[in-house]
Amino acid sequence: MIKAIIVDDEPLAQNVIQQFAKDIPRLEIICTCNNALEASSKLKENQIDLMFLDVNMPRLSGLELLKNLNNPPLVILTTAYSDYAMEGYELNILDYLKKPFSFERFFKAVQKAEEQLSLRHAHNEQSDADYIFIKANKKNIRVEFKSICYIEGLGDYIKIHLKDKHLVTNLSMKKMEELLPTDEFFRTHKSFLIRLDQIQSIEGNLVEINGNKLPIGNNFRQDFQELINKHVIK
């Protein structure tokens, strides 16, 4: 069962999502919030898998709420405007529904959420494993986590940089991030996922790994800095 929350200040929009959700047995709407501040409290009180999030709301926008969440659930933006698509995807939203949207489009977005949650579940069940198999060069190649330096996003593909070679495979950064242990890897940019124990130096907005200087994105900088500060000797 997918436990979801609706965050939207428009009663009509709330009602559409609620009615669509009733036709998907595996989707349960836990609560409906009229603004981002109310949603922030509900997210702390409940275990939420998925958030249907409007952008334009009073006092605090949906995107501002998302930026301030340390561990957000999967997010599907629901808005009447297309201007926020790029910023939304930089914040790792799962999907973008432009109002008014059909049940078919809504159902497709929920399916994406179900797939992501299934990946997370599979990863949690295999959390003791220290390797994964990657399909590259027409074969399944075993890749140990400790051998990865960093991962680079290339559209629909990723390049896994090892110490002495790299592998290219047809996976998204989101899916790869789900498969890796969160205490060993960190997303520093929309196109880069690094192994923390491979960091050689940090200078400004660049992190050096295996002799390569990789960018730290604006939307990832604060969380990354907070993580690094825990290990800085003062």
Image (cartoon, rainbow, N blue to C red):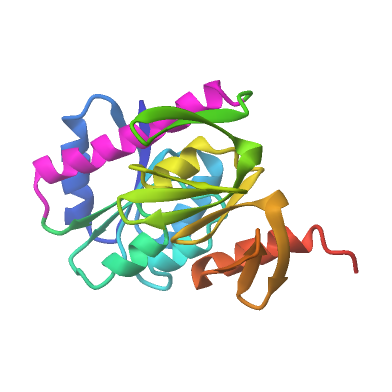
Residue 221 % position (x, y): 59, 68
Q: Within the magenta stretch, is there residue 121?
A: yes
Q: How many marks?
A: 0
Please report the bounds of the magenta region as a residue range.
Answer: 101-127
Q: Quadrant of the N terminus?
A: top left
Residue shown at the point (55%, 38%) measured from the top left = 180
Residue 196 % position (x, y): 68, 52
Kindly indicate the quadrant of the structure image that contains residue 73.
top left
Residue shown at the point (54%, 47%) measured from the top left = 165
Frontmost residue, 151 versus 212: 212
Q: Relative to residue 118, is residue 145 depicted above or below?
A: below
Frontmost residue, 82 versus 65: 82
Kindly indicate the quadrant of the structure image that contains residue 126.
top right
Residue shown at the point (46%, 32%) measured from the top left = 120
Q: Within the magenta stretch, is there residue 183?
A: no
Q: Quadrant of the C terminus?
A: bottom right
Residue shown at the point (44%, 68%) measured from the top left = 64
Frontmost residue, 117 versus 4: 117
Q: Quick check: can you spot residue 47? A: no
Q: Quick check: can you spot residue 65? A: yes
Residue 140 % position (x, y): 41, 27
